[in-house]
């Protein structure tokens, strides 16, 4: 023993064991709290459900029409009814397109204009953003991207809308 | 790596004397359970502090989900307990720790009392210790209401009626605590929350600081 080279001194050994045990205890204390705090990040994402809008598919025309719908939202301990809006029309092939009315500039709500200065365009009242019928942003106006669109589904002749995805109509 | 970082800071701001002053001092033999096992009675003060640290940490994390509002308080507690990972553990730590901190503090008080450790020159530290005791009881009282369940509500009703028995200022005192002369409701909950989370902890930190400065200044009392 006395001839061997001492790799670890008594002081070092005690330092390591005490730090180790102390660290283990601190980790045991903190781990549940940290996991508790980061829980929202780790909660599994629910797949976007399709929500019935109550709009008959047969009533949809070539002109964008405002479709309002609502659904029950569960926000942790708070349940509420959330209202959403879509601008819905049938394209040349007869496929249904449902555009989100949220302006891609700063998030105001756009509206389809039937007449007047911006006839047959979506107009944003905040900064004058304009979009054509398929949601394409008109160059020279503030928005830099086309309007997003909802995933659509038809069941029993009624329009169902799903999650919002980037615009696929603009080629 | 760490040593280099430490040296870099120490070279510039000379932090070694700071922490040595706080942490590096010999524990007298009569206080060290390694020498006399009966010296474990000296651990209760430190244990009280240790559990207080757990209470502060778990409390901080609980406020990430808790809402001090009569519509949502109970629902938010139910949510954090049932839906959030480790919610049961974190709330359990705060719940059981609250009782344990009182137990440890009581044992610490008994030790100081029966050893006569409060005598001159340490009378002032006894006074500060008793104030800490009251603050802890206040934390227990105000925290009990926060889940806003039936037990919490009726316990607080009783507690407020006890406060009302105070001579001369009883009615005013109860109104001051409850926020309303008759109702135990929305204002009571927000008040108790504010007291539990801001006012009493602030007082507690100040008093604990004074408690620790004094024990370092005066040293622990000698053997019996």
Image (cartoon, rainbow, N blue to C red):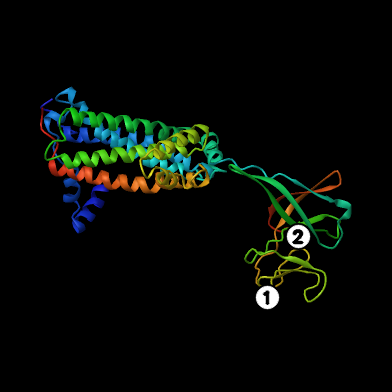
Image coordinates for residue B61, horizontal then vertical, percent: 44, 43
Q: Would residue A10 appear left or right of B178 to someone viewing this image?
A: left
Q: From what the image shows, is residue A111 above or below residue A164?
A: below
- Secondary structure beneath dot 1 equals loop
Q: Is any atom of residue A71 visible in this view?
A: yes
Please give the label number shown on residue A169.
Answer: 2
Image coordinates for residue B73, horizontal then vertical, percent: 53, 41
Q: Are marks 2 and 1 on the same chain?
A: yes
Q: Would residue B89 appear left or right of A123 to someone viewing this image?
A: left
Q: From what the image shows, is residue A89 above or below residue B214?
A: below
> What residue is shown with label 1?
A140
Image coordinates for residue B190, horizontal then vertical, percent: 48, 47
**Sequence-first tag of 2 and 1:** 1
Q: Would residue A84 appear left or right of A92 to someone viewing this image?
A: left
CB atoms at circles 2 and 1 under 8 Å apart?
A: no
Quadrant where the C terminus of chain A is found in the figure: bottom right
Q: Is any atom of residue A9 visible in this view?
A: no
Q: Which residue is most to the front?
A: B168
Tell us which disc is closer to us: 2 or 1: 1
Image coordinates for residue B221, horizontal then vertical, percent: 13, 34
Mark 2 vs mark 1, CA separation in Å: 20 Å
Q: Nearer the viewer, residue B170 or B41?
A: B170
Query: What residue is drawn where x is 24% and y is 31%?
Result: B108
Q: Nearer the viewer, residue B33 or A132?
A: B33
- Within 10 Å of the Cα at label 1, are there few (<14), some (14-19), or many (20+) other Cα atoms? few
- Secondary structure beneath dot 2 equals loop
Chain containing the residue with disc 2:
A
Please give the label number shown on residue B128.
Answer: none
Quadrant where the N terminus of chain A is found in the figure: top left
Chain containing the residue with disc 1:
A
């Amino acid at each position: 023993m006395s001839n061997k080279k001492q790799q670890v001194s008594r002081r070092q050994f005690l330092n390591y064991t005490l730090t180790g045990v102390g660290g283990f205890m601190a980790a045991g204390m903190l781990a549940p709290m940290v996991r508790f705090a980061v829980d929202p990040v780790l909660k599994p994402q629910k797949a976007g459900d399709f929500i019935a809008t109550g709009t008959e598919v047969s009533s949809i025309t070539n002109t964008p029409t405002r479709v309002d719908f609502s659904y029950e939202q569960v926000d942790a301990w708070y349940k509420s009814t959330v209202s959403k809006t879509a601008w819905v029309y049938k394209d040349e092939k007869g496929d249904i397109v449902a555009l989100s009315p949220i302006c891609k500039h700063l998030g105001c709500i756009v509206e389809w204009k039937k007449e007047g200065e911006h006839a047959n365009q979506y107009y944003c009242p905040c900064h004058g953003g304009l979009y054509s019928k398929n949601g394409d942003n008109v160059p020279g106006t503030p928005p830099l991207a086309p309007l997003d669109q909802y995933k659509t589904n038809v069941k029993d002749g009624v329009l169902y809308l799903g999650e919002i995805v980037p615009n696929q109509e603009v080629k | 790596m760490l040593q280099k970082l430490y040296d870099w800071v120490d070279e510039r701001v000379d932090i070694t004397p700071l922490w040595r002053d706080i942490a590096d001092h010999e524990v007298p033999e009569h206080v060290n359970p390694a020498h006399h096992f009966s010296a474990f009675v000296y651990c209760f003060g430190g244990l009280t502090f240790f559990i207080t640290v757990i209470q502060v940490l778990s409390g901080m994390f609980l406020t990430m989900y808790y809402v001090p509002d009569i519509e949502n308080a109970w629902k938010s507690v139910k949510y954090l307990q049932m839906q959030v990972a480790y919610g049961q553990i974190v709330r359990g730590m705060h719940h059981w720790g609250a009782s344990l901190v009182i137990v440890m503090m009581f044992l610490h008080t008994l030790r100081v009392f029966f050893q006569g450790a409060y005598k001159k020159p340490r009378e002032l530290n006894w006074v500060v210790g008793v104030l800490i005791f009251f603050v802890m009881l206040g934390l227990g009282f105000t925290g009990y209401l926060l889940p806003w369940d039936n037990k919490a509500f009726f316990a607080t009703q009783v507690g407020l009626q006890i406060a009302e028995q105070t001579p001369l200022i009883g009615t005013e005192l109860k109104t001051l605590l409850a926020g309303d002369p008759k109702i135990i409701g929305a204002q009571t909950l927000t008040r108790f929350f504010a007291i539990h989370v801001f006012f009493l902890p602030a007082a507690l930190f100040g008093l604990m600081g004074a408690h620790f400065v004094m024990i370092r200044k005066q040293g622990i009392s000698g053997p019996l």
